[in-house]
Structures are given as C-alpha cells and as structure tokens.
Amino acid sequence: SNVCCIGDTVTGFCSAGGHGSNRPFTGHWTTSNSTLISAGGIQVILTGDQGITDCGHTFVASTGSSVVTVGGLALHRVGDEVVVIGGGYGHSISGTPEVTSV
C-alpha cells in the first residue's frame, strides 16, 4: 500500500461536535511525528499523527503497518484506519506513489 504523508486525504463519518451522527467528511493530514523519514520531502504519517476534517474536527491515525515502524510507531498507509476525536471513524484514501509498505 502507498504510504500517507502530510496533505494526503482521509474520508469517513464524523459524529463529534453535535452535528449529528455519521456526517460524511473529507480531511487531510496536518501533523507528523516523523522527523527521520519523508517521501519527496514531505513527512510520512505514523500512528498517533493527526489531521483535520472538513467539519473542523481532529482525527488520529489509529492503525498502520505491523512490519514497518519508525521510533516504535507504525507507518500509516492507504486503507489504514483513523478515529475522529469526539466520535467518528474513517480511513486514508490517498498516499504517495514514491513509497509503499506492507
């Protein structure tokens, strides 16, 4: 699977912030704990990294590679899961074609 980087896209359903349950969202990765690895000069996403939904809520990378880790954190890939803080879930839908991971 392609590895996700800052700026890549996430989609899912948000129920945080009182706008009802399962509001569809699109979001983008905004933070990375990876200071050692980048793809094309853009930091890769690891479990625990955060992004923002189009409805203004924060989501966190909750799953990643069971094989590739950076500083003990799993590398997050296209298809891996996210959790919206306050309620909701989704998965990454875009990543860099420059780096793939199992």
Image (cartoon, grey):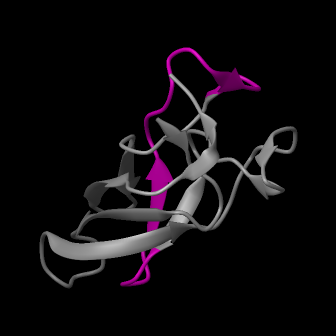
Q: Quadrant of residue 56?
A: bottom left
Q: Is residue 63 magenta?
A: yes
User: What residue sits 22% from the left and 82% below the top?
Assistant: 18
Where 91 falls versus 59 (above or below)? above
Outermost residue on the left side: it is 21
Q: Position of residue 94 (x, y in %)?
A: 46, 57
Q: Position of residue 39 (x, y in %)?
A: 75, 48
Q: Quadrant of residue 26?
A: bottom left
Q: On the rendered structure, is 44 left or right of 19?
A: right
Outermost residue on the front side: it is 97
Q: On the rendered structure, is 99 left or right of 20?
A: right
User: What residue sits 63% from the left and 54% below the top?
Assistant: 5
Q: Position of residue 57 (x, y in %)?
A: 42, 75
Q: On the rendered structure, is 39 left or right of 93?
A: right
User: What residue sits 50% from the left and 72% below the top?
Assistant: 52
Q: Position of residue 58 (x, y in %)?
A: 47, 68
Assign the magenta stretch its main secondary structure: loop
Where 11 falls versus 49 (above or below)? below
Q: Is residue 19 magenta?
A: no
Count of numbered badges drawn on the protein: 0
Magenta range is 53-73
Q: Nearer the viewer, residue 73 or 95?
A: 95
Where 91 falls versus 11 (above or below)? above
Q: Nearer the viewer, residue 19 or 49?
A: 49
Q: On the rendered structure, is 30 left or right of 89?
A: right
User: What residue sits 57% from the left and 58% below the top?
Assistant: 50
